[in-house]
Image (cartoon, rainbow, N blue to C red):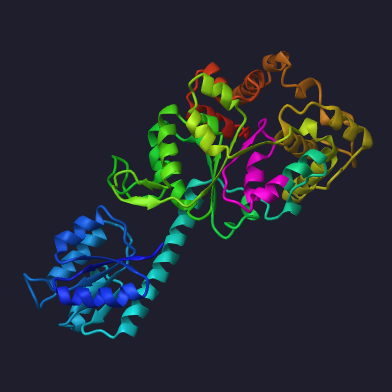
Amino acid sequence: MNKKILIADDDINIIASLKFVLADEGFDILAVTTPQAALDNLKTQSVDLILLDMNFQQDTTSGAEGVQLVEAITALELNIPIIVMTGWATIDIAVEAMQAGAKDFIQKPWKNERMLSAIDNQLALAKSDKKAQRLSQQNQLLTSQAHPGSRSGIIAQSQSMQTLLSTLDDLAKSDMSILLTGDNGTGKSMLAAYVHSVSTRKSHSFVPVNMGAIPESLFESEMFGHVKGAFTDAKESRIGRFEMAEQGTLFLDELANIPFAQQAKLLHVLEAQQFEAVGSSKSLHADVRIISATNSDLLADIKNNSFRQDLYYRLNTIELRVPSLSERVEDIPALAEHFLQSFSVKYHRACPKLSEQAIMAMQQYNWPGNIRELSHMMERVLFTCKKDSIDTAELMLTGDNNVDNTESLEDPTLSLDEIERKALIKRLKFHRGNATETAKSLGLSRSGYYRRLSKYELD
């Protein structure tokens, strides 16, 4: 898309000259002749840079109107670079304009080379500042995760995973929406990040968002951003996840947990490829690749009127199921060894070896918690195993480790947190990992449910 420049000057001859020069360089031009018209247009339209005259008809020499307009634009917190112009150039006016928020100063009559150089420099700086803002807010809002940068970062020796990865490699070359399904803990988020890392969008952001962890009242603000003063607690403007992922990939995890009332808003953005921040009437372009994931049966949710059919078909240009760990037993030894080595480095502890009997036992185990359960088991066994070799007994695949053992909740030595964690795991298993049903059965809100998952490292 061409960059758009707003010109504010009361001299139509100046506007005509600027249009001639800038249009020839590929810029789109929006021209106004009064300060008020400039402000009105900025409230409804998106521009990339402002060329601003310092003197209008009320006062043709002092530059006061120009300074006031610079201050008014700066107060809108649009982060748009302003270059001021005047035929009555003095150092005092230049300093005052820069102090008010202008980025550069050009004297009339201008030299085209100087004008174009100033514009190019300010657009480049604005792009850099925008990228820095996105990265800053990603650090504030998103949970940092180590995502694989290449296929070698994924342990997948089984035929089912090799086939899945081969398909994802092909899909990464396109921009089509991908829906990943499968049980909790199977690595859907890791695979989504992998697709991004080998796609044409890899130089831009990968932005994951847990849809179940966003309170419904903040859905639009989190996804589309808000401007300062849009609501009571909006003390500063914030960009949303769509803008963070501009030209990159937006990963919608726990897809089935999007509130039904908000699904239509998400659908509209995906169809129109544009959105408005809360409190703003300006449309922003949404150039993002969507990958989503769920462990729910969305077709059943559609029948139950809890998920929109049109949104489902918008998101699943292709739907791929990620196999459970029990379906890829060939990967278990390598995965277990990987987790042991990782935790050994993290905790600075000697790394014991897995005995053949332990490996066989793990390959025969059902793994209701999938890869996440295996990771937690290896982390625990690194501390509980007192020998150089890990035997079957150290794995604790039965007894106290069996989350279905109801007597474990009656252990008088358990703390309240331990009891709550075990109860949460049991309820999750009963509802086969369905987040909505689990939260409902416990009488929890979705945000309350996800806070507990995070608290007990079950997310």
Q: In the image, is residue 337 above or below residue 12?
A: above
Closest to the observer: 183 or 353? 183
Q: Determine the residue positioned at 48% across, 28% down.
A: 308
- Residue 171 colored in magenta in the image: yes
Q: Can residue 191 be seen in this snapshot?
A: yes
Furthest-left residue in this view = 58
Q: Determine the residue positioned at 38% across, 33% down.
A: 217
Residue 458 picture location, percent across and down: 63, 32
Span colored in magenta: 167-195
Q: Determine the residue positioned at 19% across, 73% down.
A: 53
Closest to the observer: 324 or 21? 21
Drawn side of residue 321 relative to residue 95, left or right? right
Where is the C terminus found, in terms of image quarters? top right
Where is the N terminus found, in terms of image quarters? bottom left
Q: In the image, is residue 181 above or below residue 221?
A: above
Residue 247 picture location, percent across and down: 50, 55
- Residue 114 colored in magenta in the image: no
Residue 437 picture location, percent across and down: 56, 20
Drawn side of residue 347 relative to residue 313, left or right? right
